[in-house]
Image (spheres, grey):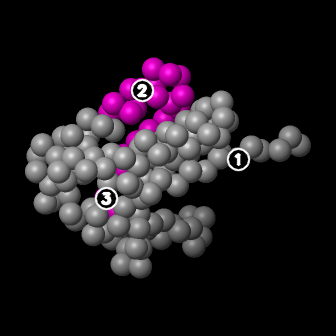
Amino acid sequence: MKYMLMMSCTRRDFESLGGWSPAEFQAHIRFMKSLNHELQASGELVLCEGLEPPMLAKLVRAERADAPIVTDGPFAETKEFLAGFWIIDVKTPERAVAIAAKASTAPGPGGRPLMIPIELRAVGQIPEA
């Protein structure tokens, strides 16, 4: 079964990164790379990406097919934003939960686990026509 694990972040969380020491930030990145390598080695990783901050995002809406409206970020009404995601392919839902739980423990300041909320959703299947 394929699942998408989504890591969200608040503006305050994102801005707090500026207060992390370089060593704390590098420990966080090493953890994420290690998790990704582990999933790749087990054959469970389909895709993973970290996303740029919402200040660099664009909101695109098709008002007419020939003239989309493009708005720059940040979006004041957004309390949380998607910081990164994984697509995994696992044998059981329990394995997907275990991977999400591990991702949640990425280290933050002082090496303490951040306990990041990870949204876990099964990838939908398109019914046969």
Image height of 73 relative to 77, above or below: above
| Sequence order check, earlier mark of 3 and 2 | 2
Q: CA distance from mark 2 to mark 1?
A: 25 Å
Q: CA distance from mark 3 to mark 1?
A: 27 Å
The circle drawn on residue 124 is: 1
- The residue drawn where x is 37% and y is 61% is 9
**15 to the left or right of 51:** left
* Magenta stretch bounds: 33-57
- The residue drawn where x is 49% and y is 45% is 100
Residue 30 vs residue 128, the one in the foreground: 30
- Looking at the rendered image, the disc whose residue lies closer to the viewer, 2 or 1, is 2
| Sequence order check, earlier mark of 2 and 1 | 2
The circle drawn on residue 53 is: 3
The kind of residue tagged 2 is Glu
**89 to the left or right of 5:** right
Element under disc 3 = loop
The kind of residue tagged 3 is Pro
- Work out whether residue 102 can be spotted: yes
Residue 51 at what x, y percent from top left? 36, 50
The circle drawn on residue 43 is: none
Q: CA distance from mark 3 to mark 2?
A: 26 Å
Residue 48 at what x, y percent from top left? 44, 38
- Work out whether residue 52 can be spotted: no
- Looking at the rendered image, the disc whose residue lies closer to the viewer, 3 or 2, is 2
Badge 2, how many Cα within 10 Å: few under 14, some, many 20+? few
| Sequence order check, earlier mark of 3 and 1 | 3
The kind of residue tagged 1 is Gly
Residue 98 in magenta?
Answer: no
Label 2: which residue? 38
Badge 1, how many Cα within 10 Å: few under 14, some, many 20+? few
Q: In the displayed image of the protein, which residue is found farthest to the bottom?
A: 77
Element under disc 2 = helix
